[in-house]
Image (tube, rainbow, N blue to C red):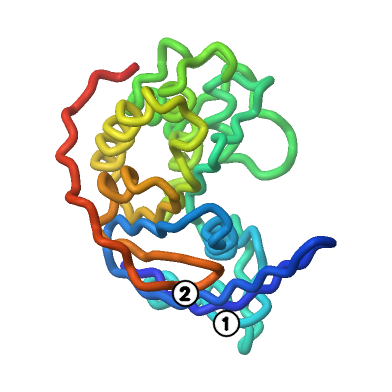
Amino acid sequence: MSFDVDIRKTVTSERRSFTLRVSFRTHARRTVIFGPSGAGKSLTLQAIAGLLRPDSGRIAFDGAPVFDGTQRIDVPARTRNFGYLFQDYALFPRLNVRQNIAFGLRSGLRNPSKQASGDEVERWLQAFELVDVAAQRPAELSGGQRQRTALARALAHSPRALLLDEPFSALDPELRDRMRAELDELLQRVDIPVLMITHDREDLAWFGDEAIYMLDGAIAERPPVLERRVPTRLKAL
């Protein structure tokens, strides 16, 4: 499977104008888009997910276009069937773990019930060891449990690929290595293509089967790739 991206997008505000001009292709199982803050990484991921419409260009997954400005193709985000893990996890604070996972399976705006169930909900509660906290809200969870809940929600609808937006930047430095190891183990279980964006070289070392370097809105010469770590499997937090 592959991502094929060639897009342009100009974003303007009162203070500045920023132009994204990104072109890359990757067949790797895990691809990391790496670069400093403000390089345009999040805009790129949002465009791939269908959360941001490019001004022109083309985005394809496994050879099939999900956006093509010339052919006027713009597949809605939900129909693209990519799982998206937001930087701050974006869990619904008033919903419990079970409801948060079930929310990704529903259409419409009504919240799932507190006892929401179903094969997919139960599968991910079991797989990510969340059964014992299924009735708790995000504020009652540890950092690892919040990450696993967000990942379970992203995976509940069986996505074709997983998009990760700076998944560790919201964590304290001392927790990041533990969370990297845990996420690495979880990703080995689900075995789907992953596209991650980050400004942290440690993330690149852990997850960068292929690295794409971004600077000032464009693909730039790649930095030296760090030796990839072989993580120790950790018990769930």
User: Is tag 1's residue or tag 2's residue first in the polypeptide sequence?
Assistant: 2
Q: Is residue 228 found left or right of 114 in the rendered image?
A: left
At x 40%, y 69%, the residue is 3
Residue 57's disc number: 1
Q: Is residue 27 found left or right of 71 in the rendered image?
A: left
For residue 130, which quarter of the picture?
top left
The one nearer the camera, 217 or 46, is: 217
The one nearer the camera, 15 or 109, is: 15
**Rendered view: 73 above or below 47:** below
Question: In the rendered structure, which amino acid carries the disc numbered 2?
Answer: Val
User: Local crowd at mark 1 within 10 Å, few (<14), some, or many (≥20)?
Assistant: some
**Is residue 162 visible to the viewer in this orientation of the structure?**
yes
The one nearer the camera, 120 or 59, is: 59
**Rendered view: 76 above or below 146:** below
Where in the figure is residue 167, as x and y percent of width and height? 45, 40
User: Local crowd at mark 2 within 10 Å, few (<14), some, or many (≥20)?
Assistant: many
Question: In the rendered structure, which amino acid carries the disc numbered 1?
Answer: Gly
Provide the residue designation for mark 2.
5
At x 46%, y 22%, the residue is 143
Where in the figure is residue 99, as x and y percent of width and height? 59, 25
Does the residue at mark 1 contact the one at mark 2 (Cβ under 8 Å)? yes
Secondary structure at numbered mark 1: strand
At x 44%, y 34%, the residue is 152
